[in-house]
Image (cartoon, rainbow, N blue to C red):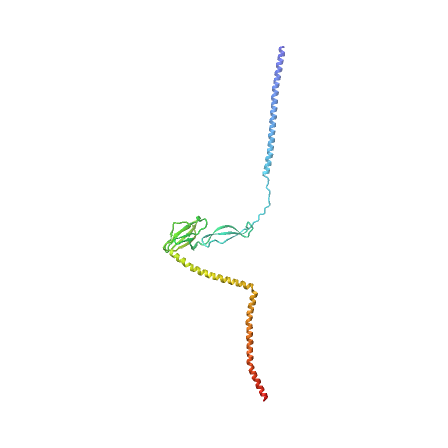
Amino acid sequence: MSPRGTGCSAGLLLTVGWLLLAVLPSARGTNVTAAVQDAGLAHEGEGEEETENNDSETAENYAPPETEDVSNTNVVKEVEFGMCTVTCGIGVREVILTNGCPTGESKCVVRVEECRGPIDCGWGKPISESLESVRLACIHTSPINRFKYIWKLLRPDQQSIVLVNDSAILEVRRENHPLAFECDTLDNNEIVATIKFTIYTSSELQMRRSGLPVTDVALIFVLTIGVIICVFIIFLLIFIIVNWAAVKAFWGAKASTPEVQSEQSSARYKDSTSLDQLPTEMAGEDDALSEWNE
């Protein structure tokens, strides 16, 4: 082979090599670009689907609520208060609703609230007593520890003595002379009730107990007699009402009896008068006959 032929074949090989190098990168770039484009389109499609799903969920979540026609009737509630459980101090009372009860009743109790009366409750009675001791109680409501209590020993013509006990219950032993105690009930440092107690000696208590039965027996006897009389009058009235016709006839017969007796007495009087007049008339007739004969 000549040197010229060798040079031509070498040049041809170089040309083919450059062409291969130029074609392969372009083809690879085209494939990569297509893959990238397909991936981008896929992501865009998923994004659009997610956007559509989110929009539909948002539309469902924010759907306007169904409107209901609700007629609100304004009911005027009228309230009245029951009687207080105490006449003095502190007690409780009922708050009664007279219009607008939930169950349609004419009256219903809404709540129970505290009520107050005059502060001074005068002289009270012990809650329990024996010949040795007495238990006294201040005026209070539940809860008992809500109030403050001040016990005082009263002395005539002297200042009272404040006791150490600050509870609602005080137990006192009887002495050889009567004692007087007072309890003040305070709410927020304000006196809301006060009550006094007299503690008698043992001998005075026995005398009072021995004197009570006689009074109780007399009172029970009088009340029993009064009840019996009232019951008798009631039964008598019922009997008269039920048997009114018979009672009326009885009273009519009784009223007619004096009239008959009066008529009989008047008839007897007339008969006796006529008998008295007969001899005189006969004497006059005899005189007339004698004169005629002459």
Which residue extends farthest top? 2
Residue 208 on image: x %, y %? 40, 58
Give the number of marks.
0
Residue 206 appears at what percent x and percent y?
A: 39, 57
Between 49 and 98, which is closer to the camera in this rendering?
A: 98
Q: Quadrant of residue 273?
A: bottom right
The answer to which quarter of the image holds residue 158 is bottom left
Q: Residue furthest bottom?
A: 294
Q: Is residue 143 above or below residue 246?
A: above
Q: Residue 106 versus residue 77: which sits nearer the camera?
A: 106
**Quadrant holding the N terminus:** top right
- 294 or 209, which lies in front? 294
The percent coordinates of residue 212 (x first, y second) are: 42, 58
Name the quarter where the C terminus is drawn. bottom right
Left or right, 97 with reference to 198: right
Asked if residue 63 lies left or right of residue 228, the reply is right
